[in-house]
């Protein structure tokens, strides 16, 4: 009886494993945007979709092995279907990564094996941690990611701004594939913290981005960087702050105590960012009320005026004298509508700005955190674009 009971328990565990794999695979391949499901469920769907998409290549192997070794017809069938869906997600990642490369005029082919190991290699790069760029403790520190063997000439500089809905996140967590790729190819990368809400309200986080730019211009030369060649990038809240960093660099209300400092940069790559706090084009539908309440309660200062909300909305600040931008967003983004990135790119272009806009056919929110086949193409496409403009 004990043996039968143990066998039944193992079969049940195997079935649950197969169904879990299948749920990840389905969420990785099925598109559910921010207007599709209730706001309180968006994060749950995003997490499964994100894991399934970013780990698609190794999950093909895991699900295929499960289909071979698990007991029970249902478990085997579920695992086999999961393996097929993960394979489709991996191929879609390769397609999107290739599309990014082609958009930049790069003919490199993404290896079929790209994404099998999702963790970023630290080979040939070093990280100098917790450098203070402003006097507000840990939240105004940065890391420098640089080649172990720097080139003889000054390196172009990329400042990375992390995401996390303005309330979470820190340096040394996000965009490592891009930062390490650039460092291996002769760039100096600054991975910054900034003050978070709700303890600090907007525009504190924008102020910190501008303070980091000021610090970079004054200090990167001693680390081998070129203060005349600086670009910004970031994803999600970091994408929002990247856009604001180039559009509001001369707004005195965001520069207390350093209003006369030069905070201009040469280029910006905002990825899957929030560009309109007011949702002027009604892109969020029924879920905008929940998002607006979160922003009012957690991010904006109490009693924020219409002008404050506009200052927090890159789409309200578009200008023809802004540096070139590369706006990247995926159609499978569950947390921010892909149409918001398209609307911002269009508005900035109509204002006379130089904008390249890439809309990925399957990219999920935060797609660039781990090394998938999509990320393989993404980092090389962004590198090529930055070299052209910086």
Image: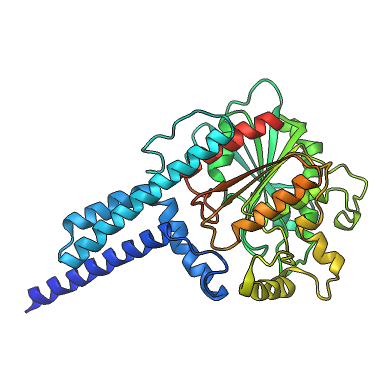
Observer-nearest of 37 and 13:
37
Can you see residue 146?
A: no
Number of numbered discs overlaid on the protein picture: 0
What residue is rendered at 80% in x and 66% in y?
309
Instruction: Determine whether 315 is above or below 221 in the image.
Output: below
Instruction: Determine whether 167 is above or below 119 in the image.
Output: below
Where, by quadrant of the figure, is residue 66 drawn?
Answer: bottom left
Quadrant where the image shows the C terminus: top right
Q: Is residue 231 left or right of residue 35?
A: right
Q: Is residue 197 left or right of residue 100?
A: right
Q: Picture coordinates of residue 287 (x, y %)?
A: 62, 73
| Residue sitting at the far top | 152
What residue is rendered at 89% in x and 56% in y?
256
What residue is rendered at 36% in x and 47% in y?
57
| Residue sitting at the far left | 1
Observer-nearest of 159 and 248:
248
| Residue sitting at the far bottom | 1
Q: Is residue 235 left or right of residue 255?
A: left
Can you see residue 156?
A: yes
Where, by quadrant of the figure, is residue 263 drawn?
Answer: top right
Observer-nearest of 71 and 339:
339
Q: Picture coordinates of residue 94 (x, y %)?
A: 43, 41
What residue is rendered at 60% in x and 56% in y?
338
Quadrant where the image shows the N terminus: bottom left
């Amino acid at each position: 009886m004990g043996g039968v009971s143990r066998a039944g328990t193992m079969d049940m565990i195997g079935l649950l494993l197969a169904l879990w794999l299948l749920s990840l695979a389905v969420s990785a391949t099925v598109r559910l945007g921010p207007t599709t499901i209730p706001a309180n469920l968006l994060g749950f769907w995003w997490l499964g979709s994100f894991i399934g998409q970013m780990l698609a290549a190794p999950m093909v192997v895991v699900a295929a092995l499960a289909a071979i070794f698990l007991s029970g017809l249902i478990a085997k069938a579920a695992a086999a279907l999961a393996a097929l869906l993960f394979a489709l997600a991996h191929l879609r990642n390769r397609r999107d990564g290739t599309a990014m490369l082609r958009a930049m005029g790069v003919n490199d082919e993404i290896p079929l094996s790209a994404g099998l190991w999702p963790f970023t290699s630290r080979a040939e790069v070093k990280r100098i941690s917790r450098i203070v760029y402003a006097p507000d403790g840990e939240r105004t520190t940065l890391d420098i990611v640089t080649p172990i063997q720097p080139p003889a000439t000054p390196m172009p500089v990329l400042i990375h701004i992390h995401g996390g809905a303005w309330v979470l996140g820190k340096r040394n967590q996000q965009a490592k594939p891009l930062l390490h790729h650039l460092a291996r190819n002769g760039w100096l990368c600054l991975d910054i913290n900034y003050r978070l809400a709700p303890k600090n309200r907007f525009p504190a986080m924008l102020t910190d981005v501008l303070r980091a730019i000021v610090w970079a211009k004054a200090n990167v030369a001693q680390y081998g960087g070129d203060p005349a060649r600086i670009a910004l990038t970031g994803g999600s809240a970091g994408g929002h702050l990247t856009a604001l960093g180039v559009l509001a660099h001369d707004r005195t209300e965001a520069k207390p105590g350093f209003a006369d400092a030069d905070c201009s940069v040469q280029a910006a790559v905002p990825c899957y960012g929030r560009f309109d706090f007011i949702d002027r084009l009604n892109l969020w539908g029924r879920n905008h009320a929940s998002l607006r309440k979160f922003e009012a309660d957690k991010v904006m200062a109490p009693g924020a005026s219409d002008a404050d909300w506009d200052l927090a909305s890159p789409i309200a600040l578009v200008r023809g004298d802004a540096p070139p931008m590369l706006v990247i967003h995926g159609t499978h983004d569950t947390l921010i509508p892909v149409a918001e990135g398209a609307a911002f790119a269009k508005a900035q272009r109509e204002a006379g700005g130089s904008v390249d806009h890439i809309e990925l056919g399957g990219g999920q929110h935060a797609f660039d955190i781990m090394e998938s086949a999509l990320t393989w193409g993404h980092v090389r496409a962004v590198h090529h674009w930055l070299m052209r403009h910086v």
